[in-house]
Image (cartoon, rainbow, N blue to C red):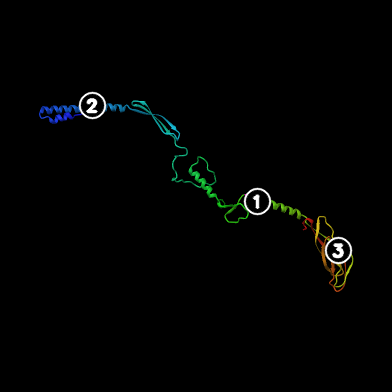
Amino acid sequence: MADISAEIAAFQSAKYGEDVRDSMVSLATKVNDEVEAATAQVEENTQEVEGFSLTIGEVTTLDPTDPATATISGSGYDLELSLGIPRGADGGVAGDISQNAVNFADASTRENLTTGQTLAIGFCKIKKWFSDLKTAAFAYIANDLSTDTEGYVLDARQGAVLGASVATNAANIQGLQTLCNGAVKTGYVQVVSSSTTIAAGGHMNDTSVAIPAITGYTPVMVSPRNTGGSGMIHFYKLYINGSNVVFSLANTRTSSVTVTSAYVNLLYVKTDMVG
């Protein structure tokens, strides 16, 4: 801005008409010159602004971790702007999501989590796994066959113990079945084969009769079978003594009785089973 302090001072000190006129002309001339110079500068600046050119050059996509870039090329009022813009991180916008709400539906089947899926799908799968957990998932584990406390499940190692026990029992049962197969046989033997008279109210002397042998079997029991004769009699004694049957017949009648035959039943057991 032009300095017009001298012209103003001259104007203020002029006393005569001619001096006043000259000071006013001088002040007006200087102000006018300043206005014309400013106007010319504005027109020049306007032409320069109107001639300014800024164009967008190459725009490059950068990795998410790279900083953004901006480069200006050209000269004067003809410039070009080139940009480098990082792309967004994979999987969405990075940042703190701890307070974000997630809406999701229940999954119909159990499926494992997979990479690249959304949070909603992930929570959906996780909830299905928790929903399907049963009581055993939260039980304690007992590695023995004696714990009977509620809330415990059996350790898998006890399966081997139980399996061995079952196998042993199965072998024992199989052995017992083999032992018991044909374990018992029956037979009979005639102990009286000729007429024998027993006095009234008396009994005959003890008599031994050999037991028919069966290979691999031992006689363990004898019982009456039948008798034949002229009256009712019964066995007074009847037992096994080694390989013989010991017996005697008794007559409970008031008259003598003649016996013509008598038989006894025999029970044999496998010798392996006899203690």
Q: Between 125 and 179, which is closer to the camera in this rendering?
A: 179
The residue drawn where x is 28% and y is 27% is: 45
Q: For the residue carrying disc 2, how many other residues have a C-alpha within 10 Å: few (<14), some (14-19), or many (20+)?
A: few
Q: Is residue 72 magenta?
A: no
- The residue that mark 1 highlights is 161
Q: Earlier in the sequence, mark 1 or mark 3?
A: 1
19 up-or-down from 127: above or below: above
Is label 1 in contact with label 3 (beta carbons under 8 Å)? no
Q: Earlier in the sequence, mark 1 or mark 2?
A: 2
Percent position of residue 49, x then y = 31, 28
Which residue is at the far bottom?
254
- The residue that mark 2 highlights is 37
Is label 3 in contact with label 2 (beta carbons under 8 Å)? no
Which quarter of the image is occupied by the C terminus? bottom right
The residue drawn where x is 12% and y is 27% is: 19
48 up-or-down from 233: above or below: above
Look at label 2 and name its amino acid. Answer: Ala
Look at label 1 and name its amino acid. Answer: Val
Percent position of residue 200, x then y = 86, 73
**In the picture, residue 224 is in which quadrant?**
bottom right
Q: Earlier in the sequence, mark 3 or mark 2?
A: 2
User: Left or right of 1: which side holds 52?
Assistant: right
Give the SS element for disc 2.
helix
Q: Is residue 158 magenta?
A: yes
Magenta residues (range) = 157-161
130 up-or-down from 237: above or below: above
249 up-or-down from 127: above or below: below
- The residue that mark 3 highlights is 208
Which quarter of the image is occupied by the N terminus? top left
Percent position of residue 33, x then y = 20, 26
Identify the main secondary structure in magenta. Answer: helix
